[in-house]
Image (spheres, helix red, strand yellow):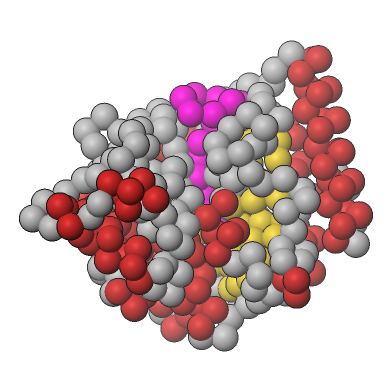
Amino acid sequence: MPGRVGLVWSEDLMAYQLSEDHPLQPIRVKLAVDQMAASGLLDHARVLAPKMASRQELELVHDSAYVELVAALSDPARRAEVGPWQVEAAGFGSPDNPIADGMHEAAATVVGASVVAAETVHSGGALHVFSPAGGLHHAQARWASGFCVYNDVAVAVAWLRERGHRVACIDVDVHHGDGTQAIFYADPEVLTVSLHESGRYLFPGTGFPDELGRAAARGTSVNLPLEPYCWDEPWLAAFEALMPVIRDFQPTVLVTQDGCDSHLLDPLAHLQASTAIWPRIGSRFHKLAHELCQGRWVALGGGGYALREVVPRAWTLLFAEMVQRPELAAKLIDPEPFPPSAETQEHIWQGLDRDLHKLAAELGLELGR
């Protein structure tokens, strides 16, 4: 019903554009919101305005010197203050993370949108809130990485953590959520779960089953890598196999990073999922939130580089599950899955079974498919 689900959106979020030819283009978010509206979903939700995150909010996870450096690089009048070695150390200057005018303000607004989502869920203003511009999960505490200047996922998690929540952060982006994992690697009150293409083949080269957390937090970092060309059936089997991890943790709020770059058409990865996985993802997160977290669910965007062909459909299908009107978006599901050859299928299943066995042994949980 209206008011119980929120969508954080305004044209201000279109400012996060690192260059004209960059793979991460903000138009994908606008196209997704337009598709949600065209499908009639916004009649069942409340649109929330984003804000620019404060320095205090950014510094929940980012080093203050890094935030100051980003602010200086964002301002052409101040850019000369920053030495070349500082630029390189902070992860800037590459095609992935170029220096852009106003990038501090634009990135802080993406973070602020995700904080608005967290605030609204925490206060009870809505049960579920989606911030599709968010999901910038590669940024580290002291440097930019993988198109991400600030890590809005981690800031939203830390904001909720400060208010006493036990947070389960589940990341289904095709790329490992390395920044978020690193920031909470020693925090036993935050569970990070990442389902992604194996780092043996894809950036950032991390996210293996033996990355389990540090000291008292061992077992609260959980990674399940998938082999290239993985299609819907093993992807969903892997996703469902991880549910006991979340239930065992007993979170009070769910934060999800919902990158949709696992699709066959995505140009930056090698999986072969279809949009048919998204109703299952949304339905499962909805049920988990109600089963474990009194309905509290903060959903964030993430990767997705088939800007027009996939992103609007995938996120509309997710949002349809959030507002419990899946029939309004059903036509956006791909009619057929995209399975690879029989030999590749066998290889994918073998890899999945191997890694589930490793995780089960480490965590002491039943994780079979």
Snapshot quadrant of residue 139: bottom left
121, 204: nearer the viewer = 204
Q: Count of labels shown?
A: 0
Residue at x-position 34% and y-position 36%: 94
* Up-down relation of residue 341 to residue 127 (above or below): above
Q: Which residue does the image show at 76% across and 41% down from the upper left? A: 237
**Residue furthest bottom as drawn:** 164
Q: Is residue 260 magenta?
A: yes
- Residue 220 image offset from top left, x and y in percent: 72, 65
Q: Quadrant of residue 164?
A: bottom right
Q: Where's the C terminus, which quadrant?
A: top right
Q: Is residue 175 visible?
A: yes
Q: Is residue 296 above or below residue 246?
A: below
Report whether 296 appears left or right of 311: right
* The magenta segment: 255-274
Q: Which SS type dominates the magenta stretch?
A: loop
Give the image location of residue 290, x and y in percent.
Answer: 64, 71
Which residue shows up at 55% across the image and 25% down it? 264
Quadrant for the N terminus in the image = bottom left
Q: Residue furthest left?
A: 77
Q: For residue 256, which quarter of the picture?
A: bottom right
The x and y percentages for residue 174 are 57, 39
Residue drawn at point x = 23 percent, y = 55 percent: 82
Residue nearest the viewer, comparing 57 with 353:
57
- Relative to residue 146, is residue 367 drawn left or right? right
- Residue 105 appears in the rendering: no
